[in-house]
Image (cartoon, rainbow, N blue to C red):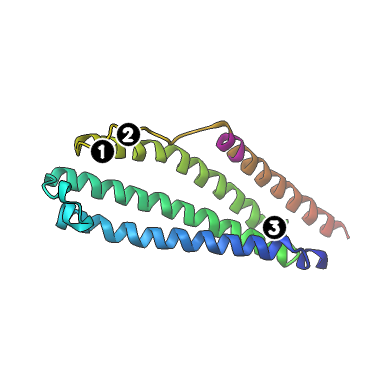
Amino acid sequence: MTSFKKDPLLPLAEAIIWFMLGIIAFAGVVVLICAPAVVIFGGEFVNALELEDLPMTLRIWIAIMLLAVAGLLYLGWRFFRAMQAIVRSVGYGDPFISENADRLTEMAWLFLALNVLSVPVAALGIYIARTAGEAPGTMDAGFDLGNLLTILILFILARVFRKGTAMREDLEGTV
C-alpha cells in the first residue's frame, strides 16, 4: 500500500487539480461580478462604445447567460473536487472505498450535465451576439465521441470500484 504514497503522478495530479480549481474559481468570481454589472452599466461596463445603447432586455439576457456560465463553472468545480478526493484516497493507500465509487458516479453525472447544458448556453450566446449585431457566430458546444466515452468510462469505473469494495469487504469478513 505504501507504493501509492511514493507515486510521482499523485503530486502532479494534485497540482493540476489545484490549478484547475483556481482557474474555475477566478472565472466564477469574474462572471458573477459581470452579471449584475452588465445589467446596470450595459456596454459602458466593458468600455465598448458601440454597445452602450444595449436595450435592457438584451442586458438581462446577457446576465442570464453569465449566470448560466457560473452554473457550468460550479459543475466543473464539483467535478475537480471529486477528482481531488479520489487522488487523495489513492495517496492514503486505500482507493477501493465506497466513497470513491460514489465520487466517480458523481463525476460521470457532472460531466454529462456539463455536456448537455453547454448546448443551450452556447445557443443563448449566439442569440445574444446576433441580436447585438455582432458577427453571426458559430456554436461549439455539445456532445462528441470523446466526451461520451469519458462519461461511459466514469460510470464503468464507478461500478468497478463498487465491486472492488464489496470484494474487499467479503475478503476481510472471511479472514
Marking on residue 129: 1
Q: Amino acid at mark 2?
A: Gly
> In the rendered view, does 170 fall on the left or right side of 110?
right
**Callout 2 crowding tier (Cα within 10 Å): few <14, some 14–19, many ≥20:** few
> In the rendered view, does 29 fall on the left or right side of 78?
left
Magenta stretch, residue numbers: 146-150
Dominant secondary structure, magenta: helix
Q: Report which residue position mark 3 lands on.
A: 97
Confirm or deny contact between disc 2 and disc 3 (CB under 8 A). no
Q: Report which residue position mark 2 lands on.
A: 137
**Callout 1: helix, strand or loop?**
helix
**Callout 3: helix, strand or loop?**
loop
Confirm or deny contact between disc 1 and disc 2 (CB under 8 A). yes
Marking on residue 73: none
CA gap, disc 2 and disc 3: 46 Å
Question: For residue 84, what is the image quadrant?
Answer: bottom right
CA gap, disc 3 and disc 1: 47 Å
| Residue 111 rendering spot, x and y as whole percentages | 52, 44
- Of labels 2 and 3, earlier in sequence is 3
- Of labels 1 and 2, earlier in sequence is 1
| Residue 81 rendering spot, x and y as whole percentages | 54, 60
Residue at horizontal 24%, vertical 50%? 63
**Callout 2: helix, strand or loop?**
loop
Say above or below: 4 vs 122. below
> In the rendered view, does 2 fall on the left or right side of 39?
right
Say above or below: 142 vs 58. above
Residue at horizontal 67%, vertical 40%? 156
Mark nearest the camera among 3 and 1 is 1
